[in-house]
Image (spheres, rainbow, N blue to C red):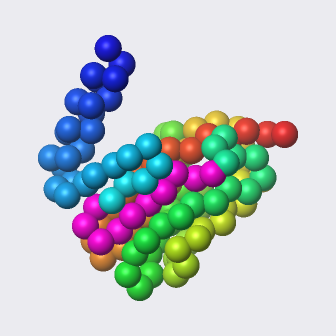
Amino acid sequence: MKRILLLLVIGVSLMSFGTLTSSNDEMTAGTIKLGQNYPNPAIGKTYIEASFNGEATLTVYNVVGKVIEERVVTSSMIVLDVSNYTEGIYLYTLESNGEKLTKRMTVKKP
């Protein structure tokens, strides 16, 4: 039952984002790609692979929508220092040329 519900949610996203495709580790919308952070759960530092043209903005939100971190990125390998984040669930969004992709990460304390 959980798998069926997940497919329905992805189907809604397909309608919202047009050419959105996804796998367990990577999402693609048009010309940008966003990978799942690793390790996940993150402790200290976490790494995100992305693909985009030019530069992009990476924004990290907590579960209530507060912006925790925002930065312009120009490299396909993004390193996030999460050592000052509180333990919990976060969302990170990559935006470039009017396209956006969002993934979820978990932060744990050692």
Q: Quadrant of residue 106?
A: top right
Give left or right: position of 22 versus 73.
Answer: left
Residue 10 in picture, x, y percent from top left: 27, 38
Residue 28 against residue 8 in the figure, above or below: below
Residue 7, given in percent of the width and then of the height, sits at 27, 31
Residue at 58% over, 53% down: 37
Residue at 78 percent across and 52 percent down: it is 44
Q: Main secondary structure of the magenta part?
A: strand
Image: magenta residue range: 29-38
One can see residue 65 in this view: no
Is residue 104 positioned above or below 2 on the image?
A: below
Q: Is 54 in the magenta?
A: no
**Residue sitting farthest toward the right:** 110
Residue 64's x, y, as percent? 49, 40
Where, quadrant-wise, is the C terminus in this rendering? top right
For the question of whether residue 85 can be seen, the reply is: yes
Q: Please name the residue shown 64% across and 36% down the image.
A: 88
Residue in the picture at 63% in, 51% down: 38
Residue, far bottom: 54
Q: Note whether 3 is above or below 41 in the view shown.
A: above
Q: Say whether residue 33 is magenta.
A: yes
